[in-house]
Amino acid sequence: MVVVAVALVAALALRRPELAIVAVPFALSLALGLRRTEQPVIAAALRLDDERVVERQEIPARIEVSATSSVERLELRLVLPEGVVVADGPDAFAMRLRAGEERSLPVTLRCSRWGLYDVGELEFRARDALRVVTWEGTVGEARQLKAYPQAEALSRILPPRDTQVFTGSEVARSKGDGIEYADLREFVAGDRLRSINWRATARRGALVVNEQHPERNTDVVLFVDSFADVRRAGRSTLDDAVRATATLASRYLERRDRVGLVTFGGVLRWLQPGMGTSQRFRLVETLLETGVEPTYTWRDVNVIPARILPPKALVLAITPLLDRRFVATITDLRARGFDLAVVEVDPVSFVDAGGTEPERLAYRLWLLDREVLRARLARLGIAVARWGDDTELDSALEGVRTYRQRARVALV
Amino acid sequence: MGVLALVEADDVALAAGVRLVALAVLALVAAIVLGWSPLLPASILLLAAAYATHLATDDPALDARAPLVAAGLLVTAELAYWSLEERGTIGTDPGESLRHVGVVTLLALGGLVAGSALLAVADIARTDGVAVDLLGATAAAGALLVVVLHARRAG
């Protein structure tokens, strides 16, 4: 329109009809384009094949779009939150839509990290054939997409020191009905005939029976540090901690153990110990809400409800060991007699040593400080599994397993 | 487009016109590279200004190339806007580009025909005196008013 106006004014001012002629195609385009000025009614929705996925897994979806009146060019763009990307192809589409026509556009999404995402909103831009008039807006309803953390490779878990009363997969220290051989003892009234050890009986000349260790379940509380997070190049210690927690929870629940969760940080979240598939989903969905909420408030173990930490439970702390409040809490738990182990999500690989000498010195001091902290925890009888870039979670836990076998009794 | 506008220009008009065309090209490239659409009308206006400079300075009788310049300017503007629209990854229906090429071609041809008709009318007006001249000016102002009213209603 600017071109038309300026050309016509210039034509009048300079008394040159050629300049008015220059305005003709532009005026024609405007006149034809402005003929229809009624906004089309557009309906669009994003349909996901699955609303629960594992991070980095591809999610087939389709965009369903229709319009009550004909749209010469309809541009649709998916409004995706940070962390969700279109796996293959464009995130915007342009099409011609006739009145009443319904179109379905296939699209594949991918969540680059675990979390809860609101997806489904679409921005649209409808234009006439000459692209003179444009209508813009947002359509579609946001739906929640749950991206579960990917499981880490883990063949063996960390066995708790004590077992509970229900049947499970852990061989108890106590004696009773079970499969695992424990000891021999003399026959007493009420013993089953099948438990008599005939060879030992023949040797001793008196009835001797076998004793077994029963298989029992255990209580495990996963204690996640959400005070601090170190991020670098799309990775973070909290992301890794959540992945490790989800993996450990799945492994323990597979053994019919009761698993509870405490995310300890700016916001305290907890889940009472439970077992089964439903507990697994509850646990992972609680984990998805985990984030670092900055706080300067001092928090200790007293803020955690007592029922969340049952007696004889194994407390597995998953932490980068960066926040003093979390370290104080785990030493406090140890002092209260809890069976405790730490999976340290090593933040060292996330931090550069620095370029200048003071920076390098500070880096070395920080590493030494961490060594001192680990030694202090070891003195308290808390085994620390260092899980970093160069160590698999499985190997890290194997170290703790060995430590706990050899250093079972610790004076606190 | 710059060459078409200045092909018959004398030295003075050519010197000014070349500068204007260079500016227009610069604005066009900047608009496309930076994705900043407000620069596009400026670029078209600069091209039109180069043509206007030739007309004002050289004062030819009646330039028969005017409809061609007009259609060329329209095609330039359409193609530039199109390239801006296609920035980023966007999935389109097959044949969408071809259809738009068709629409732009039809529009340019329509502009060419309408421009030629207007040129013929202007030629008659030029030879028939001030009354027709005034009529032409009134018609131009009226056309401008209609476009403004139409655009306001659309907005």
Image (cartoon, rainbow, N blue to C red):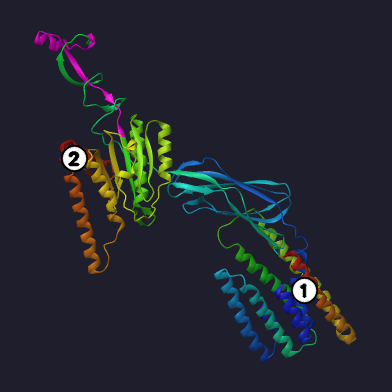
How crowded is the residue under tag 1: few (<14 C-alpha within 10 Å), some, or many (20+)? many
Residue, far bottom: B12
Q: Disc 1 marks which residue? A: A24
Q: A340 and A134: which one is in front?
A: A340
* Between A279 and A37, the one nearer to me in the picture: A279
The chain that hosts pointer 1 is A
Question: What is the quadrant of the C terminus of chain B in the image?
Answer: bottom right
Residue B13 location (% of width, % of height): 68, 89
Q: Earlier in the sequence, mark 2 or mark 1?
A: 1
The question of residue A11 being in magenta is answered with: no
Q: Residue furthest left?
A: A204
Which dot marks residue A403? 2
Q: Position of residue A388 (x, y in %)?
A: 28, 49
Instruction: Name the kind of residue labelled 1 in the image.
Output: Val
Which portion, as a residue range, is magenta?
A192-219
**Is residue B8 visible to us here?**
no
Rendered residue at 25%/42% (across/down) = A333
In the image, A105 versus A176, the foreground residue is A176
Q: Residue B78 at x, y = what percent?
A: 67, 68
- Identity, as a three-letter code, of the amino acid under mark 2: Tyr
Is residue A231 left or right of A357 when viewed as pictured? Answer: right
